[in-house]
Image (cartoon, rainbow, N blue to C red):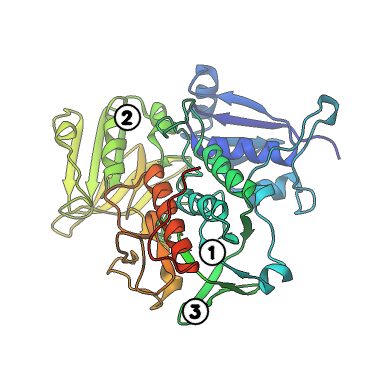
Amino acid sequence: MSKPEIIVYSSTGCPYCEKVKSALKDWGFEYEERNASIHKEYFDQLKERKIFGTPATLINGKLVLGFQEKKFRKLLDITDETASVAVDTSKGDTPKENTDTIFQSINERVLDEVYDFVTIGGGPAGASAALYAARGKLKTLVIDKAPKAGTLAITHKIANYPGVREELTGLELLERMQAQAKDFGAEFVRSTVLSVDFSDEIKKIEVAEGIIKAKSVFIAVGAKAPSSKIKGEEEFTGRGVSYCSTCDAAFYQDQVVTVVGDNEEAIHEAETLAKYCKTVRLLIPTEKLKGDVVFTQLENQPNVEIYRRHRLREITGTDSVEKIIILNDKKEEQTWESDGVFLYLGGMKPGTDFLNDSVKRDEEGYVVVDDHLRTSAEGVFAGGDARRTPIKQAVISAADGAIAALSAEQHVNKRTKLRPQYS
């Protein structure tokens, strides 16, 4: 089979562009990158095709918008057997240890074992907990269903993590944490947790492959975005619908865009877009924004219009977004012209539904914990985005992981108090 011609149109700072490029490299495919935020000719090429977002990938002339792994695999004829990391042995390279090599499948040995500590979730909280637990001589297992899909993993740039002076992607930082935990003996497996039973001294975690047993458990599943989509959203993604102003704001220079959201992220994105666009309309579905959000600066922008209690019903157009249908504060349906729509709806919800009534949760699904991150079930802890924190940051989740692991070590070894790790 001849090599496919692959062209990746990207933007500086675009997290989904990094995912596309990383996948192509892992699968061993060469590609030509055309950065539309650096070279105007590439920017113009996208606009001529009525493409208003990155990444946009051409595989033998066939277009893939965003990061659609199934579509990539189909066009590149990739199977699970062929999707391995390519290594140029002539240059003496060795495969980089990443999520694909750290996370393994569950086998009978894992199901036969009784682990001292199991963390459900391999993000910054789970990876940090695994590091502390494994270093504290606890037999440790990390379960994650999608290691590259978490909030940190898709963050395009980290520049403020303590002790890491260079800029790196969220996935790079996360892989460093996971590799460090593995160095101390932690195991990582890829699977979906279906249910849990915390009623006995030995906790039971049901996965598709069987039952995993543990003396202590850390719930570090993080948060997820709502799955429901607006009518027209999927159809026009990359053709007027976007989720990242860093990636796509330049495509809307001197145009009219609509930002829809009820959280801090929507405010920051609207501020960025106001630097490029003729008009930015901010639609807030409720009267108040979620969290402690101040947007005095945004209100003072002459090209920003703010509409409270306005809901987006539908996105319409021909080849690209042209109009939106909204429900205004009087519950009247209106049609507005809009060149683009940036969506930040619903915020993030903790992915804790699988817990049911095994531990106490609040009305939004956050696990209720004490200062030691202990839940209502003995020997079970929770942290990171699974609990209610003052603000969501990777360093806070990592700190939660350390506290949870030390608390678990106290529980497993029946100590009267926490024992810190100094050396």
Query: Of marks 3 and 1, which one's residue comes earlier in the chain?
Result: 1
The label shown at residue 117 is 1
Quarter of the figure with residue 272: top left
Q: Secondary structure at mark 1?
A: strand
Left or right position of 326 against 387: left
Task: State the residue position of label 3.
Answer: 201
Q: Secondary structure at mark 2?
A: loop
Nearer to us of marks 2 and 1 is 1
Quarter of the figure with residue 105: bottom right
Can you see residue 230? no
Residue drawn 68% across and 68% down?
A: 110
Identify residue type, mark 3: Glu
- Tags 3 and 2 touching, CB below 8 Å: no
Task: State the residue position of label 2.
Answer: 255
Distance from the alpha carbon under mark 2 to that under mark 1:
53 Å
Residue drawn 39% across and 75% down?
A: 377
